[in-house]
Amino acid sequence: MTAELICIGTELLLGDILNTNAQYIAQQLASLGIPHFYQAVVGDNPDRIKRIIQNAIDRSNILIFTGGLGPTPDDLTIATIADFFNTKLVERQEVLDDIQQKFARRGRTMAASNRKQALLPEGADVLHNPVGSAPGIIWQPRPNLTILTFPGVPAEMRQMWQDTAVPYLKNQGWGRELFYSCTLKFWGISESELAEKVSSLLDSQNPTVAPYANHGEVKLRVSARATSQTEAEQLITPVASQIQNIAGLHYYGCNDDTLASVVGQLLQTRGQTLAVAESCTGGSLGKALTDIPGSSTYFWGGVIAYENRIKERLLEVSADDLAAHGAVSHPVAKQMAAGVRERFGTDWGIGITGIAGPGGETPEKPVGLVYIGLASPDGTVESFEYQIGETRGREWVRRVSVSHALDRLRRSLEP
Amino acid sequence: MTAELICIGTELLLGDILNTNAQYIAQQLASLGIPHFYQAVVGDNPDRIKRIIQNAIDRSNILIFTGGLGPTPDDLTIATIADFFNTKLVERQEVLDDIQQKFARRGRTMAASNRKQALLPEGADVLHNPVGSAPGIIWQPRPNLTILTFPGVPAEMRQMWQDTAVPYLKNQGWGRELFYSCTLKFWGISESELAEKVSSLLDSQNPTVAPYANHGEVKLRVSARATSQTEAEQLITPVASQIQNIAGLHYYGCNDDTLASVVGQLLQTRGQTLAVAESCTGGSLGKALTDIPGSSTYFWGGVIAYENRIKERLLEVSADDLAAHGAVSHPVAKQMAAGVRERFGTDWGIGITGIAGPGGETPEKPVGLVYIGLASPDGTVESFEYQIGETRGREWVRRVSVSHALDRLRRSLEP
């Protein structure tokens, strides 16, 4: 029993809109445990839509369509599906009434073109649209093949999915077997390094373990099929903790955890506070910390010392060190961290100084060179040097610098 | 001559990630005038990938693949394509060297698994990846069929597309009829207001004018088909300037301009400097300003005053006003702006204080209430009150607050 998604709309092929419907339905199918191996996008063209249907019915039992249900001449989805299965369209009085009422409620009269939206394949059930004028269908044109159609408008599609499709699919006995998945997150180790460390687990079938990476962060998704969440967790938990043991401190959290949220939890547990001094990141670290609701209980704020004079004036960075070592150096990172901790009266202080580029590099100091200072409650101050991929550009260097800074503090806070 | 897009990655089928690559490549193909009728998404599974290739080669001449070029065992794209066309993989020394150098630059040694990324089909050209380790290929496995592969990481895919794919496709004589488009950007006016003001232009055919909106920002895309960029510009320019006249100060820039980049240009022209004091935005304004390369010439930095004590200590906000009016108030916003301008010695100062939520609201002060203070070179200080949609959540309130602050300064800087 597998589903296949067919998104119809020339605007998708022109790149005018992002196909968020595909992600939503993919997530929904995964959570219902309905396997889903193919997605297709095709324009509002009957012949091409039929080619896609022909490919799909050879390999899938549930075809889910989005888009092309509107009243305009280029909306052909329903007519094309009916034609493919040699079924005639019948006007549904209840749909026509519903559309007319919706127009009436907005004090408008139904346009003639909307009448077309009441034409549905003979034998198909109406998939009611509580929001817009376009209804969908639930139809079995032949044994062991079910077709569901949804409008392209995400809000309408989502509500129809929840109100009608989910109960229908569950009634069919699908979505009984749960697909439960947990994403483990790591910092400070590359995807290939981690994959090698856990290689023995990458072939396991239930749960499966799949690595992926973005913005320097590595993730492992552990996914299990089971008939209950408890059973799924019993499959996932031992594998997850095995991975955590292998990864050690490189593992920082799972699912919705971020480095900033984990640091926040650790600071709260300890009842400690933090202030930051940012040069090349220009506020990005503060933003990351305050993205977390409730961060004001442990994050007091910081100084964006983008100009060197500000490093001296507000953070008491020594002018001599700035001259001798340059703003991007161990001593300046340390003094920024210590200075902001001192000035704000917090337990911890972080300083970031680096070369985000483009430009600003010297022979000794390439773009991507970043120093992170960490001032601890006991008064000790450390600093760390990073060479962040200079080819990846300014945004990358800034983003990864923020993660390195948060990760340094996290490792110091971990019990 | 038609192209077809094949996106490979189980994470797409699980809905873990949004397929932004599909939209980007669709836009690019449209702008090159290369017809594109089908997109497919399939998991990291050789048999299914081959089914998709089989379908595609019957109807398209250019197959564009994204994803599955990584070093881990589930990255199968190149091997599967080679196998489909019965071609053996050959290790490319130049690719291996390139990967090793990239690791070396980050002070790492290449993992054994990365070696696989140097295996490319015999006869295929290397599509160089200037950023990450995974190269792509440009390959004609048979006459009248071209295959291009890109990594799934959007930043890498986009740079490789621009650096290599676009010149290659143009060399092939594709993309002759140009689809040129220019996006006009607005702040402080709603999509519907703007659409009404320019309604007469929305039906025009060449150029077309299409409105869209995101995160409170409204855009109009003006698109023309032409055989040369000059011809396209001759079609677009009069319409664009007509729109700018209608929109007045609500228009702030076009294409890659952002409110932060426009503010930066205006400050540079005047030779003036800026410092910011942020409470609810927690560094987001500083980040937005320093997202712009070269911003250090006019942006000196700021204070993230997330804790009220910091507002007093570093910005001389009066304790009495904090007590009498609360941190989210006109007087505090003004004192933050004036305080940071004073303390940093800049021409302009901005202060932001508000309730980003969730929580923290009072009967008089709902979530989304934001005050923005603006201190000017002549010493005058204004403040502005905003009620930002409280239903839209913390990220929205913070993001829109930053845009309002930048827009306030922009309007004061505009000649």
Image (cartoon, coloured by chain):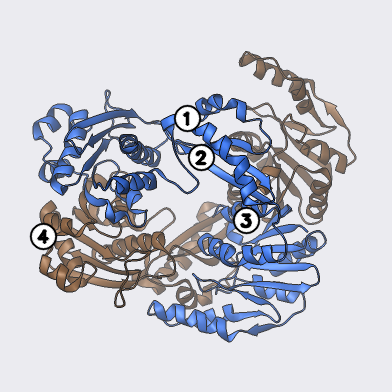
Chain colours: A brown, B blue
**A97 sits to left or right of B160:** right
Q: Earlier in the sequence, mark 1 or mark 3?
A: 3
Q: Going 27% across and 27% down the picture, which residue do you hit?
A: B365
Q: Earlier in the sequence, mark 2 or mark 1?
A: 2
Say which of marks 3 and 2 sits in front.
2
* Quadrant of the frame with the C terminus of chain A: bottom left
- The reply to whether the C-beta atoms of the residues labelled 2 and 1 are less than 8 Å apart is yes
Q: In the rendered structure, the residue with mark 2 lies on which chain?
A: B
Q: Which residue is mark 1?
A: B247
| Residue B339 seen from this side | yes
Gap in angstroms between the C-alphas marked 1 and 4: 47 Å
> Residue B385, how many percent across, how many down?
29, 28
Gap in angstroms between the C-alphas marked 2 and 4: 45 Å
Q: In the rendered structure, the residue with mark 1 lies on which chain?
A: B
Q: Determine which of the numbered discs, if any, sits on residue B25 in the image.
A: 3
Gap in angstroms between the C-alphas marked 3 and 2: 22 Å
Q: Residues within 10 Å of mark 2 (few under 14, many from 20)?
A: many
Quadrant of residue B248 in the image? top left
Q: Residues within 10 Å of mark 3 (few under 14, many from 20)?
A: many
- A272 or A77: nearer the eye? A77
Q: Total number of numbered labels?
A: 4
Q: In the rendered structure, the residue with mark 3 lies on which chain?
A: B
Q: Which residue is mark 2?
A: B184
**A52 sits to left or right of A299:** right
> Residue B282, how many percent across, how many down?
28, 46
- B51 or A169: nearer the eye? B51
Q: Which residue is mark 4?
A: A316
Q: Type of residue at label 1?
A: Ala
